[in-house]
Amino acid sequence: KDPTIKRHANLLHHLLDLQRQIGDEAWRATAREYIAAMSKSGAAPGAFAKLEIVYYYEHNIKEAIELSTKFLEKYPTHGLAAEASFIKGDCLRLSGDKKTALSVFDALISVYSESSGARFYVNAAVRQSADILAESGRVKEAIKRLNRIVATNPTAQALKLDHIGRLYAGAEDWKEAARAFQREARIHGASIDTVCQALYNAGDCYYRMGDTASARGCLLRIIDRAPDSSWCRKARGTLFVWDEMTGGPDPT
């Protein structure tokens, strides 16, 4: 309601981030000041500020679960409820209670799937829940879930396909993993680093399948597209190792 209070709180938040990055212990005093500033905006922002400090800065999982639960019980429709839900699910996952974490993520996805303002937390919940499903052997269900992510830019598209590729690779489905990484490498507007990483991963999958020609092709594309990069040096080194193991490059 008061833009001056909001600006003050935002500045304190930025200061808090910087202090944590440089290891300045004064961040604890700033955190208390930040919570007080947010509380002036209302009870809900003040309660959420305390949750932020406990989760993002103190990494106190148990207390974060308690605070997020209380916040959601008291302010279930607040604009910060989506982030609070994600925090609760993530803390439950970290505590080892993955079954309850999955139910929290499922509820978050269901309630906020159509909310553009909560898209970041919905997508994060999708990724976290997909990992939980994959760890329990439900890889196809995990992939199906990841495909629901709304990727609106090249970076988000690459992150989505990289995640899908890694889940397939974890299940040793090298063909599908290679396909996902190849799709990632073809994303229009993706950075050269993203493209090179995707090609390297695809090449690794092809090699594990026994398709050495396709594997070499992926690494040669890295060398051609980014000759002065660290990815080029890595690709050359891998090709050298492969050639040493097989007695030389494939004549074809």
Image (cartoon, rainbow, N blue to C red):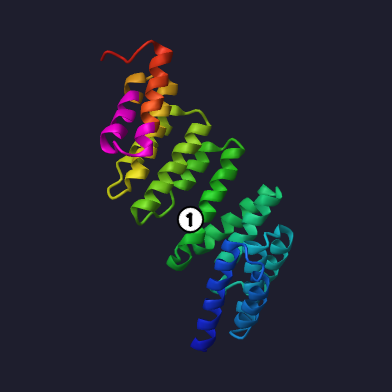
Query: In the rendered view, does 217 fall on the left or right side of 61?
Result: left
Residue drawn at point x = 69 percent, y = 66 percent: 69
Magenta span: helix, strand or loop, mainly?
A: helix
| On screen, residue 251 above or below 223 | above
Residue 14 place in picture, x, y as percent: 53, 72
Residue drawn at point x = 32 percent, y = 15 percent: 249
The reply to whether residue 210 is visible in this rendering is: no
User: Mark 1 = which residue?
Assistant: 123
Amino acid under disc 1: Asn
Residue 48 place in picture, x, y as percent: 62, 73
| On screen, residue 110 above or below 8 | above
Q: Secondary structure at mark 1?
A: helix
What residue range appears in magenta?
A: 216-233
| On screen, residue 110 above or below 133 | below
- The picture quadrant where one finds residue 23 is bottom right
26 within the magenta span: no
Image quadrant where one finds the C terminus? top left
Residue 219 place in picture, x, y as percent: 34, 29
Query: In the rendered view, does 249 fall on the left or right side of 103?
Result: left
